[in-house]
Image (cartoon, rainbow, N blue to C red):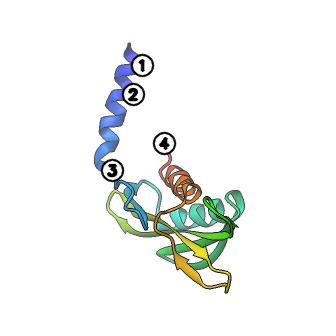
Amino acid sequence: MLRTAGLAILALALLPACDVIEPEGRQQTTTFTTSLTPQQTRANAEGWLGERALYVVTSSAPGFVRAEKRRPRSTGPGEQIDVVSASFHGVPEGTRVEVQALTFEVAQSGARNRADQVSPEALRDADELTRVLMPRP
């Protein structure tokens, strides 16, 4: 009983720190504040994307990391490119982070066409990146 009450209090305490936005179709964005510094946030984002999720980091700056992963299409034949990015800046509480996911379908010509929906794989990866960047005590 006490454990359940403690978890409920913890969940309520975390609500103001995390503004989850429901799927928007063509992109998914999650915004939250982490206790990590901007430097730690960048290092953790690059490390998880590149080493654990096997994305290719295509852009990295002090306040931004962007990575891509080519994989078979979730629906239908062909390939898709999932893009996950994190932008961040320091705030008094730690670091304000925005994680974004989107998907491109690769045409036979090699052109990228923005998919109508973010792939389930990109959504899962963005959710996991959010968990990595928001460590629990």
Mark 2–mark 1 CB contact (< 8 Å): yes
Mark 2: which amino acid?
Leu
Q: Which residue has dot 3 on it?
A: 17
Q: Residue 91, percent across and down?
A: 33, 64
62 or 130, which is in the foreground? 130
Q: Which residue has dot 4 on it?
A: 136
The mark nearer the N terminus, 1 or 4, is: 1
**SS for dot 3:** helix
Mark 3–mark 2 CB contact (< 8 Å): no
| Residue 99 vertical position relative to residue 16 in the rendered view, above or below | below
Q: Disc 4 and disc 3: Cα gap in Å?
A: 12 Å
The mark nearer the N terminus, 3 or 2, is: 2
The mark nearer the N terminus, 4 or 2, is: 2
Between disc 4 and disc 2, the foreground one is: 2
Q: Which residue has dot 2 on it?
A: 7
**SS for dot 1:** helix
Mark 4: which amino acid?
Arg
Q: Disc 3 and disc 2: Cα gap in Å?
A: 16 Å
Q: Residue furthest top?
A: 1
